[in-house]
Amino acid sequence: MAVPGYPAPPGAVAEWLTLADGVNLRTARWILPASEAHGTVVLIQGRTEFIEKYFEVVGELLARGLSVITFDWRGQGLSTRAFPETLKGHVADFSEFDADLAAVMSKIVHEHGTKPYHALAHSMGGNVLLRYLHDNPHEFERAVLTAPMLAIKTAPYPEWVARSLAVGSAMAGGRNAFVFGGAAQSPLELTFETNGVTSDVRRFERFMSCLKAEPKLALGAPTFGWLEAAFRSMHLVASEDFAQAIETPVLLIGAAHDQIVVPGADLMLVKRIKRGMYVMLKAEHEIMMESDEIRRAFWACFDPFVGLTNSAYRTAPKASSTAA
């Protein structure tokens, strides 16, 4: 989708992918010639995110000689929403997200991508990626997770209270209802001062320009059903046996000023993963949407981890530097 002042990197191929349960996923891919590609990055978004938000990141990956494949999760972006009330963020179980990622891998990555495959996942996307790494130990060469959703901040409630409320509300028939206060939240009225995910005003305004250009991209608060499913998945991926079974080398990049997830949960998970590394940056939750200085630090971690050197970089596509 064209956004004024923020075009897609050249060479994009957009495609709808229909799953067995009737969900339509919006996918996009940028595939370099096999002779130029150093591999393929599967870019896995967090909750509320969409393809256009990552145009800058896509351009930077292409400049590194990496093909890129990404998609909108069910329930967000332009993929199928759960309810006519489209601002509700809902899923009954994270196995539905598992199905989304598995379909993209099978139908898009395996058919169009160049090996080796690397994963780059943010927040909720990191949670689902960990599930995939556990079940598919030899799929990805490397996996990089930024601020993965392993434990969420639940203030003003303690975590056990928030989880009990989610479980109780779901059991009482409120599974499809907004979490408390969620109905009053409007993503189109979010301000930089209250955003809580980035300290970079330019990138925040770019995100908002995407929503204003196409309001259908907007997603509001989650439902109690989503929250209850998220608690179950967070408990699963952080458990010792689950984490120890992951064979893929994993780099977790935490955000010291994160207001969404608990950074300390990253470090606990890394201690349990066989081949895990951990870096903490002085960033808000959306590390890849942060200031130039923080983003340079992010790429300084990413590049050597996936085996890139400066000599491997191509000239960045013109569109990729638009919003820097």
Image: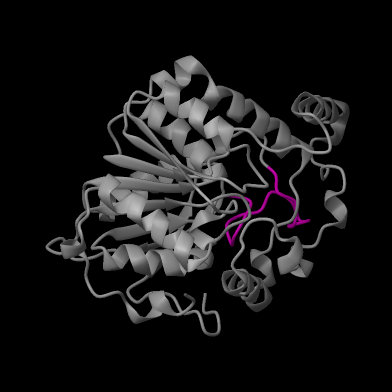
Q: Residue at x 35, y 77 (%)?
A: 10
Front-most of residues 202 and 68: 202
Q: Residue 130's image quarter? A: top left
Magenta residues (range): 74-90
Front-most of residues 292 and 74: 292
Q: Provide residue 24's location: percent of width, then percent of height.
A: 54, 54
18 is within the stretch colored magenta:
no
165 relative to 276 in the view: left or right:
right
- Looking at the picture, the colour scheme in use is one colour
Q: Provide residue 184's location: percent of width, then percent of height.
A: 87, 56
315 relative to 293 in the view: left or right:
left
Front-most of residues 146 and 173: 146
Q: Provide residue 5's location: percent of width, then percent of height.
A: 52, 84
Q: Residue 249's image quarter? A: top left
Which residue reaches farthest top? 241
77 is within the stretch colored magenta:
yes
The count of marks equals 0
Q: Residue at x 68, y 76 (%)?
A: 212
Q: Provide residue 192's location: percent of width, then percent of height.
A: 71, 68
Q: Is residue 300 above or below residue 3?
A: above
Q: Residue at x 74, y 46 (%)?
A: 222
What is the magenta segment's predominant secondary structure? loop
Q: Residue at x 46, y 20 (%)?
A: 242
Q: Is residue 216 above or below residue 172?
A: below
Can residue 30 be seen in the rendering of this structure? no
Which residue reaches farthest bottom? 4
56 relative to 185 in the view: left or right:
left
Q: Is residue 224 above or below residue 323?
A: above
Front-most of residues 211 and 83: 211
Can residue 120 be seen in the rendering of this structure? yes
